[in-house]
Image (cartoon, grey):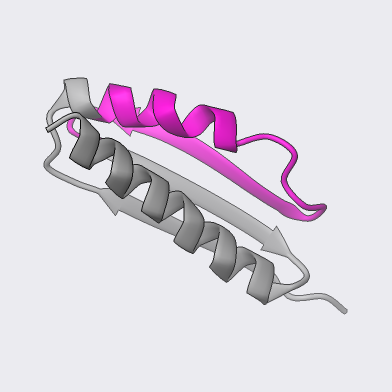
């Protein structure tokens, strides 16, 4: 039996323009995920919401979350 996990990360209090830009920057990363792993990116006002779902290898989930957050941080630094 494989483990199932859902992780929701909210990046709050970012201008809606920046949220939109970061969302667009992350969308190319949201393809060709390993089997059993997915990411849904939402924008709600001044909040960027990252919804990860995983079934299986938790190490893949952790490394993917780390990579996506790193990319989001880089995008935020670039658009300061």
Residue 40 position in % (x across, y down): 54, 39
> On the picture, is 21 further left or further right than 69?
left
Within the image, what quadrant is residue 8 found in? bottom left
Residue 23 position in % (x across, y down): 39, 29
Number of numbered discs overlaid on the protein picture: 0
Q: Quadrant of the C terminus?
A: top left
Q: Residue furthest right?
A: 1
Residue 77 position in % (x across, y down): 20, 41
Q: Is residue 76 above or below residue 38?
A: above
Say if the magenta span includes residue 40: yes
Q: Is residue 49 above or below residue 54?
A: above
Say if the magenta span includes residue 29: yes
Q: Residue furthest bottom?
A: 1
Q: Which residues are magenta?
A: 19-47
Q: Is residue 47 above or below residue 24?
A: below
Residue sitting at x 47%, y 50%? 68
Residue sitting at x 38%, y 54%? 70
Residue 48 position in % (x across, y down): 31, 38
Residue sitting at x 22%, y 34%? 78
> On the picture, is 22 further left or further right than 51?
left
Q: Quadrant of the N terminus?
A: bottom right
Residue sitting at x 17%, y 32%? 46
């Amino acid at each position: 039996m494989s483990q199932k996990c859902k992780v929701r990360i909210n990046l709050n209090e970012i201008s809606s323009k920046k949220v939109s830009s970061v969302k667009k920057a992350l969308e190319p990363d949201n393809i060709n995920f390993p089997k059993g792993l997915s990411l849904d990116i939402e924008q709600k006002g001044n909040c960027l919401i990252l919804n990860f779902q995983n079934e299986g290898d938790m190490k893949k989930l952790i490394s993917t979350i780390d990579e996506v957050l790193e990319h989001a941080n880089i995008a935020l630094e670039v658009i300061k």
